[in-house]
Image: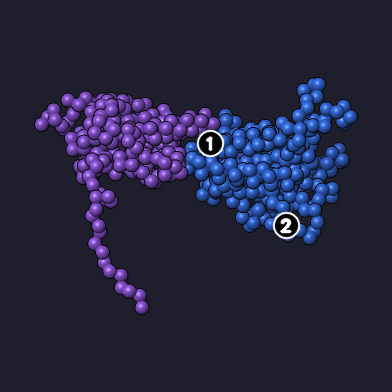
Chain colours: A blue, B purple
């Protein structure tokens, strides 16, 4: 790497002459090699999905090393990257949510939660004695005061944005391309003349996210994984809960079938070309 | 065998008697010279918001330190607070709550809820109950719940109510307001109720008096008004 050896990558409190902070960029790299984490804001809620690599066949996979965590009644986060770093962010998120409720007597607004978490993550990029978080965090939350639901993502640099669809981890680029094809942006959906009613629903999003995660996974090359999913929607009373196992299973079966069919079509096309 | 305990009638000595001091439960614990808003305050919900009303007398024992004070303090754009008890304590409390609400509004980028103001006030009142003499009523309008009223009496409870009365004068008008209050009044009906009730309290309560100050908080904004002592709906001027 061009930066190593220059001495400017030893501390996150040092800028390089061209204005970069290499330690933070390395932290981003840590996330880029981790399991894919996806979030989708739908018409009736938010869905989170994470690809959890299974390091051995002996894991008790449903309960160990979770990537999706409930923070508060109406808020949940998905983490990817260094999971132990992510746990620290989860703890902080729970603390922030609980403190806010204690102080003001109302639930923390999603944007405030995201901003507070991002300030926390950012703090670790300011001090020479600290290491930035090697972890990206997707925040799904509902605001009972405004009745709005939202999806935010905090990156290792401490930067936060609100998204219709967010992706982090190894498969983020192709996942973004796939998510852009889904009806998640109300403005685009309205412009296409279909109206608000055709925005993607959580039930549909679970299937689509399963399909994206399975299609990005190379069974020959990548480790086996478990698909962890949670949602926060009208159907769950806006509480952040795990997607029922049965629903995930159905989505997985559907996703695998879709992928197989698409591959079938592709190979047919190839055959046609050969004939010509 | 234990000796049967004999009943002893309560002693009435001059040292520990409940001798009449001219002070109410609210003002009894004031230090000598401490200003008290020995008071009548109230807040009433109506269809579009809240009406708050208060008398204007500030006293130190029998001496009226200020006859035209303002016991209705603004906490945020649409949130107000009626103060009773120690003037110093309630001023300090409203200053804190105003400060916290301003901070919160900046952080969240939206109007704070009345219940948040009440929650902050009750936290301060409860956690410092041993050192405070404050009974306040918080009322106002917010985009989530519309008009709402919270009563925060001496110990630091926080009770949402359709209307709330407070201060030494309130004891004289509970029956009146209980029978006159209706849900979803118009602004004018609510204002008339407040003026009538507070003037009756001012007539009977020695530590309430002066003018009536009112505040109407709605989505549109706030209207502050004052009814002078010689224009009260009930009182010496009309006797």
Considering the image in quadrants, where does the N terminus of chain A appear?
A: top right
Q: Position of residue A38 (x, y in %)?
A: 68, 42
Identified at 70% across, 39% down, the residue is A136
Counting residues from the N terminus, which is met first, the one under dot 1 or under dot 2?
2
The secondary structure type at the circle numbered 1 is helix
Considering the image in quadrants, where does the C terminus of chain A appear?
A: top right
Q: Position of residue A210 (x, y in %)?
A: 69, 48
Residue B217 occupies which quadrant of the picture? top left
Check disc 2: other Cα within 10 Å, few if <14, some if 14-19, many if 20+: some
Q: In the image, which disc is placed on residue A61?
A: 2
Q: Nearer the viewer, residue B78 or A237?
A: B78
Q: In screen coordinates, is A218 left or right of B103?
A: right
> Rounded to the nearest whole Å, what is the CA distance between mark 1 and mark 2?
39 Å
Q: Nearer the viewer, residue B75 or B218?
A: B75
Identified at 79% across, 37% down, the residue is A29
The secondary structure type at the circle numbered 2 is loop
**Residue A26 in sight here:** yes
Q: Nearer the viewer, residue A81 or A12?
A: A12
Q: Which of the chains bears the disc numbered 1?
A: A
User: Residue at label 1?
Assistant: A196
Q: Which of the chains bears the disc numbered 2?
A: A
Q: Position of residue A98 (x, y in %)?
A: 55, 45
């Amino acid at each position: 790497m061009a930066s190593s050896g220059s001495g400017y990558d030893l501390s996150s409190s040092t800028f390089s002459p061209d204005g970069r902070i290499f330690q933070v960029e390395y932290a981003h790299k840590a996330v880029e090699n981790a399991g894919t984490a996806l979030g989708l804001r739908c018409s009736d809620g938010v869905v989170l999905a994470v690809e959890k690599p299974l390091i051995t066949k002996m894991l008790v996979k449903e309960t160990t090393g979770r990537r999706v965590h409930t923070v508060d009644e109406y808020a949940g986060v998905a983490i990817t990257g260094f999971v132990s770093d992510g746990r620290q962010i989860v703890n902080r998120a729970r603390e922030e949510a609980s403190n806010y409720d204690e102080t003001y007597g109302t639930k923390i607004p999603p944007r405030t939660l995201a901003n507070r978490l991002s300030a926390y993550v950012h703090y670790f990029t300011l001090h020479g004695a600290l290491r930035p978080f090697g972890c990206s965090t997707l925040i799904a939350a509902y605001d009972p005061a405004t009745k709005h639901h939202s999806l935010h993502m905090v990156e290792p640099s401490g930067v936060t944005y609100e998204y219709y669809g967010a992706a982090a981890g190894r498969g983020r680029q192709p996942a973004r391309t796939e998510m852009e094809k889904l009806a998640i942006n109300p403005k685009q959906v309205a412009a296409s003349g279909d109206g608000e009613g055709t925005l993607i629903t959580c039930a549909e999003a679970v299937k689509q996210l399963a399909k994206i995660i399975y299609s990005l996974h190379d069974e020959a090359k990548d480790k086996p994984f478990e698909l962890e999913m949670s949602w926060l929607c009208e159907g769950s009373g806006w509480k952040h809960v795990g997607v029922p196992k049965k629903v995930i299973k159905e989505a997985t079966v559907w996703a695998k079938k879709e992928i197989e069919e698409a591959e079938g079509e592709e190979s047919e096309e190839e055959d046609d070309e050969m004939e010509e | 065998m234990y000796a049967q305990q004999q009943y002893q009638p309560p002693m009435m000595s001059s040292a520990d008697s409940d001798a009449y001091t001219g002070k109410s439960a609210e003002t009894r614990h004031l230090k000598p010279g401490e200003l008290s808003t020995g008071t009548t305050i109230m807040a009433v919900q109506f269809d579009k918001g809240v009406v708050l009303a208060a008398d204007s007398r500030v006293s130190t024992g029998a001496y009226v330190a200020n006859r035209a004070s303002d016991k209705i303090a603004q906490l945020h754009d649409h949130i107000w607070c009626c103060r009773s008890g120690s003037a110093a304590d309630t001023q300090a409390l409203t200053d804190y709550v105003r400060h916290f609400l301003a901070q919160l509004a900046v952080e969240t980028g939206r109007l704070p809820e009345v219940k948040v103001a009440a929650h902050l006030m009750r936290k301060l009142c409860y956690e410092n109950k041993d050192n405070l003499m404050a009974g306040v009523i918080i009322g106002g309008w917010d985009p989530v719940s519309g008009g709402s009223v919270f009563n925060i009496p001496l110990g630091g409870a926080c009770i949402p109510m359709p209307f709330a009365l407070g201060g030494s004068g309130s004891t004289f008008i509970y029956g009146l307001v209980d029978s006159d209050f209706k849900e979803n009044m118009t602004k004018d009906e609510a204002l008339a109720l407040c003026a009538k009730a507070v003037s009756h309290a001012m007539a009977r309560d020695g530590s309430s008096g002066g003018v009536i100050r009112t505040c109407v908080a709605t989505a549109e904004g706030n209207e502050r008004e004052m009814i002078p002592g010689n224009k009260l709906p009930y009182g010496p001027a009309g006797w």
